[in-house]
Amino acid sequence: MPSSFLARLGVVQPLVLAPMSGASTPALVAAVSNSGGLGSHGVGYLAPQAILDDAARIRALTDAPFVLNLFVLPDEFEEDEPAIEFARATLDTFMERQGLAARTSRPERWAPRFSDQFAALCEARPAAASFTFNLLTPAQVGELKRRDIAVIGSATTLDEVRAWAELGADAISLQGAEAGGHRGSFLHRPEDAMIGLFALLRLAARAVSLPLIAGGGVMDGQGMAAAEVLGADVAQLGTAFLACPESAAAQAWKDDLTRAQDTDITTIRSFSGRAARGLRNTYVEAMAGVESRLPSYPVMNALTSPLRRAAAAAGRGDLVSEWCGQAVGLLRPMPARELVARLLEERMQALQGLA
């Protein structure tokens, strides 16, 4: 049975798809939502019109509820010119040595304005909206609630859990240290906020009475059941869906995930300028000695975009940001609908075993 939070949204199965900006697609979101779960779409990289277009594509594929996720960022960014020039020279030299014709460029903007993205999200009116990298303002929370959009805040520490609770979030998405992709920490340095999911879950369950969505290292129904036993209302899975045909992950990335070992996952800053969890590959190793000299997010993310596009087109998974969670070794490539059915069956069997 779904939690009261999911039931309020009209969701019938206790499973949430993690947003995964850059890898989630309308087709993947709709497949999960059509299977009774709650599909989430990461739109943090998208311009406002693209957010509206993707929301329309999801609605063309499903009548079920879904979530849109945004990165909470300032509208304007400080530019560290020496760091930008160093990054461009380093990346251009690296791409030349790797045989890629692409080179860096300076975009008109480093990232879309968050205020414009937020306005587009409000216009799209998903059932719920989730946010990471920082808190919303009270006015923004109020705007979402006036539109009957449930607010989900992401947290990596207990202080962040409490901050979202005080702001009036409807639910909190816990990002354990095991989670793949960008770290959502905003009150602590990422290296100080690497708290395991089950520890964070127990602390949060004692501290607040809000619904808790547990994410990080959950790859199967047994993990879903374990999270619920420890106090989660529902589990959130991202890496488990990366190898699905509906995922936008490059094929080379998908292939590398199937061969990954548990010790291959590390914290990476050199792709985007912000701490993220993924595979240690050729690019990561090459940049290990210069990470401290690179610009922060989103500047670095924009500068590595030509590299990532060219590498994906060339089938060079070892040169793209291969985000994934700690339990990637449990990955099972299959269509999303089949995976949801398998996960729900495993969860039920696990809970029946406990009973």
Image (tube, rainbow, N blue to C red):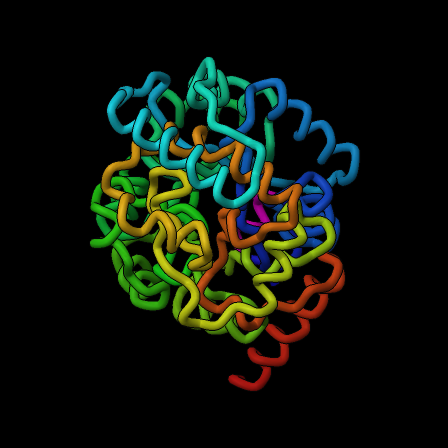
Q: Position of residue 83 (x, y in %)?
A: 27, 29
Magenta stretch: includes residue 8? yes
Where is residue 231, by image quadrant?
A: bottom left
Q: Position of residue 52 (x, y in %)?
A: 64, 23
Q: Would residue 215 be visible to someone looking at this image?
A: no
Residue placed most toward the observer, 110 or 236: 110
Residue in the picture at 30% in, 67% down: 199
In the orientation shown, which residue stands out farthest toward the top? 108
241 to 271, vertically: above or below: below
Residue in the picture at 24% in, 53% down: 191
Magenta stretch: includes residue 39? no
Give the magenta-colored segment's residue range: 3-9
Residue placed most toward the observer, 112 or 71: 112
Residue in the picture at 71% in, 42% down: 64
User: Would residue 268 be found to the left or right of residue 51 on screen?
Assistant: left
Residue placed most toward the observer, 173 or 244: 244
Position of the N terminus, as image quadrant, is bottom right
User: Would residue 270 be found to the left or right of residue 309 on screen?
Assistant: left
100 to 287, vertically: above or below: above
Q: Position of residue 70 (x, y in %)?
A: 47, 33
Q: Would residue 55 be visible to someone looking at this image?
A: yes
Residue in the picture at 52% in, 47% down: 320
Query: How many numbered marks have been drawn onto this rendered protein structure?
Result: 0
Q: Position of residue 301 (x, y in %)?
A: 43, 34
Where is residue 296, by image quadrant?
A: top left
Name the magenta segment's main secondary structure: helix
